[in-house]
Amino acid sequence: MNPSDAPYMSLVEGNLDLVRRVANDVHRMVHRRIEVDELINMGTVGLIESARRYDPQRGFQFSTFAYYRIKGAILDGLRRHWNQFGRTQRLVAEETANAYLQEKSLSLQQGNPSPTTADLLERLSSTLSGLSACYHLSSEGLDMLPDPEAQTGFEEVERRSDLAFIRGKVAGLPPDWRELVAAIYDEGLSLDEFARLKGRSKSWACRLHARIIDHLRQDGEAAP
């Protein structure tokens, strides 16, 4: 091993349990259709990438920095197996929500290192609203199919109302923003695939996706 590799290899070796935990969490969504060891192998790729890119000077815990990249690597890997178990609503939602959370975590790293309680509450509220938008968009991609988990007729009506509201807001987005939403949530492209289609980087696509989600969660108050 090259001596210059020692710092990041130490991070990799010390966080293999994190990969196992994330892999087990994702495995619950796909059950026996793929072995958990295969998910661990996918996640380890994300862990190695995180170790190479981690900057301890930013004061962010490595486990927090690595978590979304590990999960993202697993979800990216699962795309190769969609022919086995289908493009499910939950996997699309997990993938887009994870990309959104990863982008938000980057902004936190660059923000105030000592936020107030009010700052933390605002961050939590805005992030939860953004996640809700991701999950609604994932549902919208299924053409308003009934939710098998809905317990009452009222719950299903409420869900469809929320989806219609999000669909209306998406219709008012600029054309290039609508293009990303359609590609990711309707056509099934990953953010990486969309970025390559546009000749851009994955980080560009993730930033644009997060910007769109933040706009949608603000009830249309801010112009794009």
Image: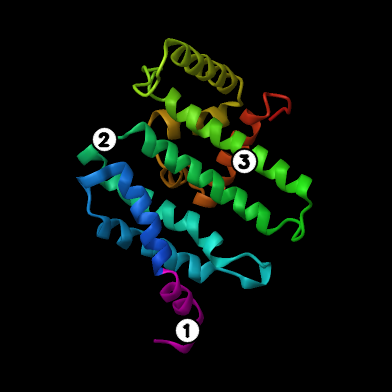
What residue is shown with label 2? 86
Q: Is residue 188 visible?
A: no
Which residue is at 23% across, 38% downward?
85
Give the SS element for disc 1: helix
Residue 52 within the magenta-colored segment of the rendering: no
User: Spatial distance from mark 1 to mark 3, Cα to Cα?
Assistant: 35 Å
Q: Is residue 141 above or below residue 44?
A: above
Mark 3 crowd level (few <14, some 14–19, many ≥20, 10 Å Cα): some
Magenta: main secondary structure equals: helix
Residue 14 within the magenta-colored segment of the rendering: yes
Counting every numbered tag in the picture gives 3
Whether pointer 3 and pointer 2 mark residues with C-beta atoms closer than 8 Å, the reply is no
Position of 130 compared to 156: left or right?
right
User: Spatial distance from mark 3 to mark 2, Cα to Cα?
Assistant: 28 Å
Give the SS element for disc 3: helix
Q: Position of residue 46 (x, y in %)?
A: 42, 61
Position of 118 compared to 98: left or right?
right
Mark 2 crowd level (few <14, some 14–19, many ≥20, 10 Å Cα): few
Which residue lies most toward the bottom here?
Answer: 3
What residue is shown with label 3? 127
* N-term mark: 2 or 1: 1
What residue is shown with label 1? 6
Q: Is residue 203 above or below residue 197?
A: below
* N-term mark: 3 or 2: 2
- For the C terminus, the quadrant is top right
* N-term mark: 1 or 3: 1
Which residue is at 38% across, 63% downward?
45
Stretch of the chain drawn in magenta: 1-15
Q: Position of residue 168 (x, y in %)?
A: 57, 16
Give the SS element for disc 2: loop
Which residue is at 32% across, 45% downward?
28
Of the residues tagged 3 and 2, which is closer to the observer?
Answer: 3
